[in-house]
Image (cartoon, grey):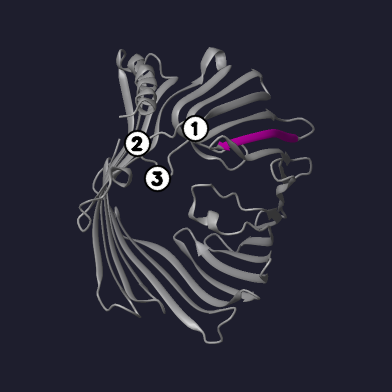
Amino acid sequence: MKKRNVLMVCLVLLGSSVLFSQTVKTNGYIRNSVYSYATQKTEGSTATETHTRLYQTINVNVSSGQLSAIQLHFAGRALTDLAETDLSDLKRFKAYRFSVSGKGLFHNFLDFELGRQFLYPGLILGSLDGLNLTVKPWKNISWQIYGGMESHLLRAFKMYQPSEATVFGSRIKLNHLLNTNWHLVYLQKMYHSQTQWQIVGLNVANYSLPHLTVLLQSHYDLVNNRMHRLYLSARYQVNRKLFLSGYVKEQYPQVYNTSYFEIFEVEQYLLAGFNAAYQLNNRFNLTAMVQGVQLEEGYGNRFIVTLGDANGSLGLIYESGDLGNQLGLLIDYRYEILKNLLATVSVDFSRYRFEKRFDYDSQIANALGLSYRFSKHWNARLEYQWLRNTDFKYDQRVLNHINFIW
């Protein structure tokens, strides 16, 4: 194990050693999953590709009864592919979270988390191997500072060197000033000692008018000297049954240097939409959405209507414009057969045509599932998935979960 990996483990274990010297309390879950699939393409080879993968997942939080503000967190996964015996450790073992945190320390003055963690500090960041620190000197003011290395792309038990992917940022939150919450945000990301992102911005949430919430996110890219993200939305409650919302977003995709999508030229897009939700009666609700997107390649529209209740929904989707056309049917429903035995069904049928093709193609995807709760701590789920389109003659998958929750 390299020195930087050892350092991360030692820092987390140093914090956790305090916990194990006291009375320990834990909560979390352990999941064992079996995922099998068989696919055959419509063109080329007629051979069927089959895989069976075994996943063991654990998510656990550990705290001390006498020092409950300090916690140890771990979320990880191990993979075994029965058809691929030479799977590398980078793909076999993953750590999504491995950290020590403290919340409300020194009379609610300080929060911290040290180790691997997921962050959304007012803008898109992702996973970080480092320190996240928040101080709250007054009731409505807090200052967040975070820094370290970007987590490994595959979330493997490995850390990048500081020269490879360094991240630093800050956020200042000022709440309840003029019926508004204000967030000043800053993010700097270095990749091989060169600045990849340097984004500064302002997030605002206003509640001045009754039943109306207005959100604004304005982020500027200092590296490329351009507006990186501009997002404006409003949500209004007309009455007890009717809600209206709308939004406009203009943004450049935020692509990582290690991502496959770096091979594409980054272009700005403009997205706008309007939503309405109406409660028909005590059981059913109706939602409607209209979206429009503007890209360099052209303009596209999307219309979605959904009828739903507490058990699921039935929806229709229609897309048109320069990017192609599609008409689809969406069904997602669950039904309690017996006590603790739940059946679910999902259907996605679409008929689509790409921009430069005149013939329509069809695609259908189904998922049937059964879930059963054996006790307060044990439950299991079995799901069958089936897909067919112009590229695949068939794609069949079986997914099984056994969960222990405590």
Residue 181, given in percent of the width and then of the height, sits at 71, 34
Residue 260: give its label.
Answer: none
> Is 57 drawn above or below residue 146 in the view shown?
below
The amino acid marked with disc number 1 is Met
Circle 1: element type: strand
Query: Quick one: 322 or 264, which is closer to the camera?
Result: 264
Quickly name the residue at label 2: 157
Residue 154: give its label.
Answer: 3
Residue at the far front: name it.
193
Please give the count of numbered marks on the rendered protein: 3
Q: Quadrant of the N terminus?
A: top left
Occupied quadrant, residue 277: bottom right
Q: Which residues are magenta?
A: 180-190
- What's the distance in space between the residues labelled 1 and 3, CA to CA? 14 Å
Category of crowding for the residue at label 3, using alpha-carbon neighbours closer than 10 angstroms: few (below 14), some (14–19), many (at least 20): some
Dots 1, 3 in contact, CB < 8 A: no
- What's the distance in space between the residues labelled 1 and 2, CA to CA? 14 Å
Quickly name the residue at label 1: 149
The amino acid marked with disc number 2 is Phe
Direction from residue 140 to residue 135 in the image, left or right: left
- What's the distance in space between the residues labelled 3 and 2, CA to CA? 9 Å
Dots 3, 2 in contact, CB < 8 A: no
Residue 241, given in percent of the width and then of the height, sits at 65, 57
